[in-house]
Amino acid sequence: MSRRNAEAWLLALVGVAATIAYVSVYAARFHEISRDSIVTGLIFAVLFLVIHLTERRYLPQADPYLVPLAALLSSIGLTEIYRIAPALALKQGEWLAIGVALFVATVLVVRDDRRLETYRYLIGAVGLVLLALTFVVGTNVNGARLWIRVAGFSIQPSEFAKLAVVVFLAGYLNQNKEMLSVPTSRLLGLHVPPLKYFGPLLVMWVLSLLMLVVMKDFGMSLLFLTTFIAMTYMATARIAYVVTGAALFVVGAGGAQMVSHVHERFAIWLDPWKTASGSGYQLLQSLFAMADGGVIGAGFGRGYLLYANHAPTVPDLQTDFIFSAVANELGLAGAIGLIVLYLLFAWRGFHIALHASDGFSKLLAAGLSTVFGLQSFIIIGGVTRLIPLTGITLPFVSYGGSSLTANLVLVALLLMVSHRSMVVEAGSVTERLRLAELV
């Protein structure tokens, strides 16, 4: 079976599962099965069919598992959002359509991921501009400056900035990895490369601290810095960068404790019961919701997620705490299954990176997989109280147009790397066979 045919069969299974889940929620809410609920599932399938057909035409050798995984995660998210707030599910569906259009546009415009390396500084500058706009004109939501409101829409620029930063780091590290691997100077007793090569990495550290102190965005700050440290290590294989980066972040985070919003997040993490009727209420309700799900849960549409007045039992349930909703309705088994889906997605991303044919593509695929996996870990870790709570979204599942569309662009970039590596590998095999025949 060809890669695209395998993907088509997997997408068909996801489409059936998504339709069943949506019908289940509708039946639980209205005690009947409506034609509209089935049509909604079909529309979801059509959107991912557009992605599939785009791959068939332009990326026929791309990885066959990423898109079905993204589709399955999106279907879980849309189902739970509809369960919590049907009006928001409609908006999420509209954002999904926009994301599919961006996916197609990315494939048509970029075509070859190596073209991005030529514009790495420009793309990096665009990422910095997006974050600067958030600094200047951003709107505070729940104590953090994350959003820009334009014409009635709310956009989270950091979701797109993270992609720009990964592209810049992939190009910069690929060009300078030799110099970064051989320190020639000393700074505070540490061996470091020349400042002109090390400078951009210091800028990344300062940027992550600015996000922590100025924007009060602990989640994205942690995501940016850990991604930058991971990519630097992958390019240079020097553990010193990991240790130094972690130490610098701890110092910066310690200083950021003076910021009330960050300090409150740590206090809730350490003892939510102390403020159970105030700032700790949200996290405690989340823990109760997950515990209520038991081992297998009650099923989509049947968990205890809404009060009698249809208000969510957990504040921000459709965004920051949607993992709690999944754990409540699908139980421990469903929660573990969701985590496995994220692990599979990250594994396929790193598999693509390992088989990429050039240094830039390897770092790009590895960086995109890292940022996706870390974002999933950070939000799930916060909701389960493994780490302090953050305000970032769960990829493909949480309500939010910026996150959904940015992650579909991420998938498009990974597929381009995968397609080209397979084409190059097939070409090299053909060449070896030709030479063998000549011998």
Image (cartoon, helix red, strand yellow):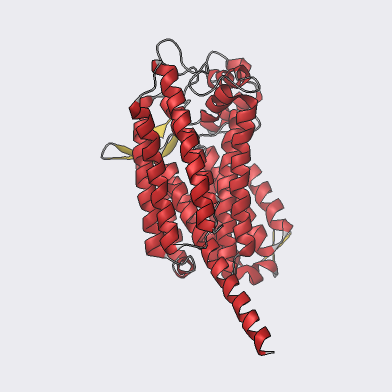
**Residue in front for this viewpoint, 308 or 272:** 308
- Report the front residue among 394 and 244: 394
Q: For the N terminus, give its image quadrant.
A: bottom right
Across and down, in percent, residue 82 comes to 41, 27
- Is 328 or 398 nearer to us in this picture? 328
- Asked if residue 255 shows in the view, the reply is no
Q: Give the x, y percent position of residue 174.
A: 58, 68
Q: Residue at position x 54%, y 17% from top? A: 281
Residue 63 x, y percent position in the rendering: 55, 57
- From the viewer's side, name the closer residue of 53 and 97: 53
Residue at the far bottom in the pictured view: 439
Residue found farthest to the front:
1
Lateral position of residue 83 relative to residue 94, left or right: right
- From where the camera sits, is residue 114 visible? yes
Picture residue at 63% right of the left edge, 57% below the top = 351
Q: Residue at x 62, y 55 (%)?
A: 350
Residue 376 versus residue 359 in the image, above or below: above
Residue 120, image x, y percentages? 47, 65
Q: Is residue 400 left or right of residue 168?
A: left
Figure check: 249 above or below 145: below
- Furthest residue in direction top, as rendered: 308
> Which quadrant: the C terminus?
bottom right
